[in-house]
Amino acid sequence: MKKYFLTVYDKSGEKLLDETIQAADDRQAKKLGEKRLTEEQFNDRTHRLTSPSGALLLFHR
């Protein structure tokens, strides 16, 4: 399992969510990240999901 990083910010730049997601691959991490954003109702907030290599898998501004 690889570690992926999900971060959500409010308009002032304050972190609202800063979590590590464990996933087998990028596709699974993206699905888990989207699920977590929906659970917390953060879909429309600024967020990003990055892979262990630094690739940007999800981004919303």
Image: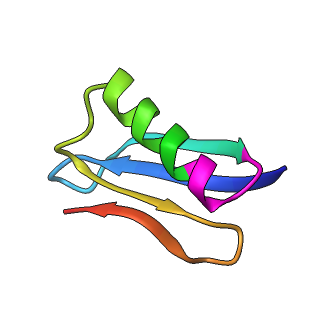
Q: Is residue 22 left or right of residue 10?
A: right
Q: At x 43% / y 32%, what residue is drawn?
A: 35
Up the image or down, 23 lies above or below 13; here it is above
Q: Residue furthest front?
A: 27
Who is closer to the viewer here, 28 or 47?
28
Q: At x 84% / y 49%, what residue is drawn?
A: 1
State yes or no: residue 25 in magenta: yes
Up the image or down, 47 lies above or below 53; here it is above
Who is closer to the viewer here, 25 or 7?
25
Q: At x 24% / y 40%, what residue is drawn?
A: 43
Q: Residue furthest top?
A: 39
| Residue 9: x %, y % from top left | 30, 50
Which quadrant of the figure has residue 34? top left
Which quadrant of the figure has residue 55? bottom right
Q: Residue furthest right?
A: 1
Q: Which residues are magenta?
A: 23-29
Q: Is residue 24 left or right of residue 46?
A: right
Who is closer to the viewer here, 2 or 16?
2
| Residue 37: x %, y % from top left | 36, 35
State yes or no: residue 28 in magenta: yes
| Residue 20: x %, y % from top left | 65, 45
Q: At x 32% / y 29%, what residue is drawn?
A: 38
Please identify the quadrant where the C terminus is shown.
Answer: bottom left
Up the image or down, 15 lies above or below 48; here it is above
Q: How is the image coloured?
A: rainbow
* Badge count: 0
